[in-house]
Amino acid sequence: MVQFKPYYSGLVTPPFRRAVSVQKCLRAGGKGSDLENVGRTLRHHTFFEMLGNFSFGDYFKRETIVWAWEFCTGAEGLGLPPERLWPTVFGRRDPAGGWTYDEEAEAAWKNQTGVVHPIVRLDETENFWGPAGGTGACGPCSEIKFFMGSDEELARYRELAGQGEKGLARLAQDLVNEGDLFLEIWNLVFPEFDHQPDGSRPPLKNRGIDTGAGLERVTTACQRVASDGRVLSPYETDLLLPIVERVADLAGVPYPRLAGGAAAERTLRGRGFAPAEVRLAINACADHARALTFALAEGAIPSNEGRGYVVRRILRRAARFGRKIGLEEPFLHELVEPIIEVMGETYPELKAHPNQIRRVIRLAEEQFSRTLHLGANLLEDLLEGRAAGRTLTGEEAYHLYDTHGFPLDLMIEMAEERGLSVDVEAFERRLAEARREARASWKGAGAVDRGPLVEDLRAEGAISRFLGYETLEAEGRVLALVRDDQRVEALEEGQAGLVVLDRTPFYAEGGGQVGDRGGLLAPEGSLLFAVEDTQKTDDGFVFHFGEAQGRLEVGQAVLARVEAARRWATMKNHSVTHLLQGALKRLVGPHVTQSGSYVGPDHLRFDFTHPEPLPAEALRRIEALVNEQIQNNLAVTWEEMPIEEARRTGAIAPFGEKYGARVRVVRMGEFSTEFCGGTHVRRTGEIGPFVIASEGSVAAGIRRIEAWTGLEAVSRTGRDRSALDELARTLTAPRDRLAERAAGLMDELKALRREVDRLKRKRAAGGEIPTVEIGDVLACVAWIEGADAKALREALDRLRSRHRGRKLVAVLGSGDNSRATLIIGATPELQGGPLQADRLVEHLAPLFDGSGGGKALLAQAGGKEAGKLRVALEDGRMLAALRDRVASALP
């Protein structure tokens, strides 16, 4: 409801007084939240549909409560039994022992409905909502809870409710704490106060209604009891059961129902499964697959940050649950079909490109399988040999997460299986530190706490107008100055700070377009402040970051001038991203959705959803189509309009952007129509040549095109042409035959490398490796010139074959200027003793400053000092160390 806040406050005149919504919701918070509890409870889902009705200064509490009761119990509504509905209202005990409560709501329930139970009062933690975002509309709530228990349990609670204040107090506790027994199906919120920054709550100009009813919970209440009398869960209703059944089929296990299903439970136990764990796994897979399908249909893609990180986390959790019930191969993409069968008619976007959704899910799950395999092996190495109760450090956990993408929750699970733990707090600190470093940009841009400044400006009645669509130069007045996080009255020459103007032509970074640079000048033309970066707030204020070149004071009049050449180059690159998206949708497919961009003066990046690389021919056709639209010199126009009207035009709205009641729509002829707040050229012909520099992957299912326009494209292609000419001269081939010539040279190089390897192995095999007797053990210690690790292992195999039946230990080394390699091999008879390979490598590697590891029969060590290794092998130190190991084991 955040977009409705201005309607309640009166800042914006509501275009309608009543509204009804069906909202797709995806929610996946941290520990203790929805994601962790999905599949375990009746209440938690990653994806759900939220039904709501709203009033902006129209109907209020009495009407809402009456209509809610009629809808819940009426034959034309849900038809729920009244005795299973338990309404609550806001109420709390005051210090004197009396009640402060929502009298209007309680009276409506008692006098205007057929409610059969006493009204239960719950305090702020349960029955007071908001505000969303820290300030604005808030108010008391009235929840409707549905009793999911048996008739006998219901009778017991009815008796409890009749025991006066004491009974109602106990009932209130159970309504909150009883888990799934009382299922909240509808929350009636009554926004009537306007929460201020100082904590005060004056009345809203347009008090109203904001309700929320989760469809999954409502459906569970309606379909609570099956024909055989069993109590159902959300996963056994029409919404989720077809998906659940497909998971069970793929896993080849029966689905254990919430109640009953004894035969299924016996089958599972007989196969070594715990029924509750199987139920949890299947539920989670079904729920998460539905969330993934909807998120991908909206253009979200699994990635490392933002919404993509949430999607990836959901996918990985589902994949892990699948493995617990035997689904080792990618399977989540197989669930897209039943999801579309259930929900595709209501949400046609699911049907628009199902193959794309399946491909992206499969690719991401395959990638996770590789991550899981690699990360699990590395984690095993880290945990190996640690005593119970020890901790995996935050730095070690962060390295696994950052370098190999291994999820923290899986680290914790694997550590706990060994009686170990993970230092989660240290991991979180390291992660936060890394994110701060990643966000760090200009020296002052990240340092200012913008919230208090904006609140102060709003309280002062200040406004800031952006004039940069029409002009690159405008007169303005300084509204505020900030230095070192504090508002100041003036900035002196050389001081870095932040400036807010009442009028500015500077475009603030947004929508992928970089912020403008330029200067704030005195009336006579001297530079007062060099603007190095510009950022904006949701309230429309533009923050100019930079350094004072003279004295600048609050209230001072300035001439704000944007660096024209930089803005002009940036506008070309921004406008061409619209043409590029249009070309991709036409030539690659309608599933293509923008998932990020960078638009600067020097180049552009455009990230889009697609599961596989684009062939060179496809890139040539895309480049040609964009240049064709540039040559057509299409008119570029823009218009502000209500958001619903904009959607009806078919304008593309980038996923994840925030929009108000009115939006700006940019058109480029008939070729492109998009929501966009950025700056653009007036006609496409002004863009100049468009050249694609590269295309590649940035995450599973996300591709990136980098490109140039205008003079930068001419300059870059000129440099590329010069480089090709130089390469043609070097390879003595014409430019149109360079690829063929390079391929031939590569074939020659590969053949030469194979011959070198063959000669190395021949030389390694040619010499007789000396052996000595140490008791009943035959020891081989030798430096083999020119051998790599593979050749050393082959030499070891030959030694084992030649001396079959003997106790044998071999220590073989080789190396070059940059690397030393030591291979140690032992026969099975030496296992468990001092000469087994993994024990020997720890003893011998320090002799050449090396390190390594391995198993009982084969170990390997490496180091940088090949000369030290050769000396250690040839001067008898390695052999002496072997003799000492044998002697230490003798009685």
Image: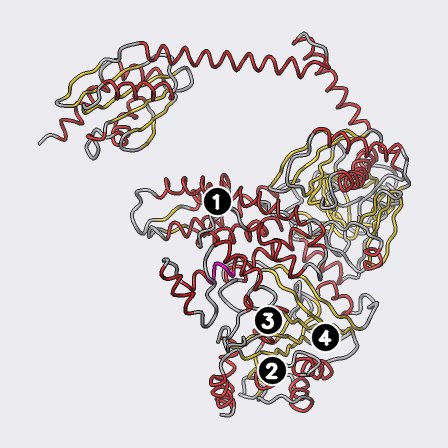
Image quarter (top left, top right, bottom left or bottom right) of the C terminus? top left
Determine which residue is flagged by label 3. Answer: 217
Q: Earlier in the sequence, mark 1 or mark 3?
A: 3
Q: Amino acid at mark 4?
A: Ile
Do the residues under discs 4 and 3 have CB atoms within 8 angstroms? no
Give x and y (percent) for residue 723: 70, 16
Mark 1 → mark 3, Cα distance in angstroms: 34 Å
Please report the residue visible at 26 percent of the width from the left and 10 percent of the height from the top: 768
* 334 relative to 61 in the view: left or right: left
Give x and y (percent) for residue 470: 89, 45
Q: Badge 1: few (under 14), some or many (20 or more) residues near its Cα, within 10 Å? A: many
Q: How many marks do you count on the picture?
A: 4
687 or 251, which is in the foreground?
251
Q: Given this view, does label 4 or label 3 mark the residue nearer the observer?
A: 3
Determine which residue is flagged by label 2. Answer: 87
Residues in magenta?
279-283
Q: Is label 2 in a helix, a strand or a loop?
A: strand
